[in-house]
Amino acid sequence: QVQMVESGGGVVQPGMSLRLSCAASGFTFSSYNMHWVRQAPGKGLEWVAVISYDGGNKYYADSVKGRFTISRDNSKNTLDLQMSSLRDEDTAVYYCARSQMHTIGGVIAELLDYWGQGTLVTVSS
Amino acid sequence: AIQMTQSPSSLSASVGDRVTITCRASQGIRSDLGWYQQKPGKAPKLLIYAASTLQSGVPSRFSGSGSGTDFTLTISSLQPEDFASYYCLQDYDYPRTFGQGTKVEIK
């Protein structure tokens, strides 16, 4: 069955870096776009970044642009998020999510149909 | 970036009640909107995509409607397992943006 497991979270000081990983299994990883979504403690969901199935296209939230880098290794079925210049406000649970595309009435709809369990990143001095 | 304004931020309801949550986009997004349910300590779960298409396995008491800028998630008869937070997400453009969320609590 489809499974995604995030890892790499922990406590880090402001200004430092951290790399998150998401190990995917149970589906053809190289065929799917993948997203990172985060949730600060007690807050709502915030979309972070997406990478296309082949790694050729990447988009970021304005709040992380220039500091975070999304990447993937289709030979290892892994998705990564390299986070640098971390700030207090980056403290959150980080989820990876699979993107599924459905064509409805000639329009392509994107849905995030499978999510990992999340990994907690705490930025604190 | 497209802003998604979701309301209400919270509501109290009883089992069997009809519940409606709305999401308004800052610009037209066709029907490029999904609804997600999240329970405490758990990952979000997809309920509806393309504004009104029910995800496989999701109970039919959930429905979605709308297009352009105004969207609605309706739970026709609230069940105990539906007490959770709900979020809309636009997939019309990047960056993707979520609504602020609606917490559905037991009255």
Image (cartoon, helix red, strand yellow):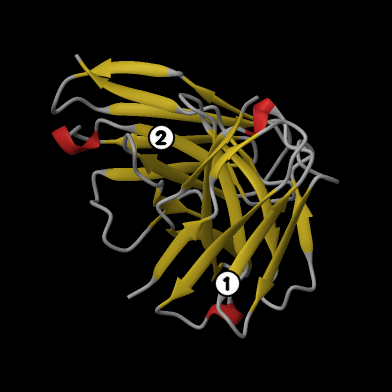
Q: Which secondary structure, mark 1?
A: strand
Where does label 1 land, which residue?
Answer: A78
**Viewer-nearest residue: A24 or A88:** A88
Question: Mark 2 or 1, which is nearer the eye?
Answer: 1
Across and down, in percent, residue B84 comes to 31, 32
Q: For this view, does B14 lie left or right of residue A9?
A: left
Quadrant in the rendering for residue B42: top left
Answer few, some or many: residues within 10 Å of disc 1's Cα (few below 14, many 20 plus, some between 14 and 19): some
Quadrant in the rendering for residue B40: top left
**Viewer-nearest residue: B71 or A88:** A88
Q: Count every numbered label the image shows and give the total.
A: 2
Q: Residue at x 38, y 72 (%)?
A: A2
Across and down, in percent, residue B54 comes to 37, 56
| Relative vertical location of residue A106 with respect to residue A58 in this rendering, above or below | below
| Relative vertical location of residue A88 with respect to residue B93 in this rendering, above or below | above
The tag on residue B84 is none
Q: Which secondary structure, mark 2?
A: strand
The tag on residue B86 is 2
Give the amino acid type for the residue marked by disc 1 in the picture.
Thr
Across and down, in percent, residue B102 comes to 42, 26
Question: Among all residues in the image, which is located at the extreme right?
Answer: A66
**Viewer-nearest residue: A119 or B79:** A119
Q: Is the C-beta separation of discs 2 and 1 under 8 Å?
A: no
| Relative vertical location of residue B12 with respect to residue A79 in this rendering, above or below | above
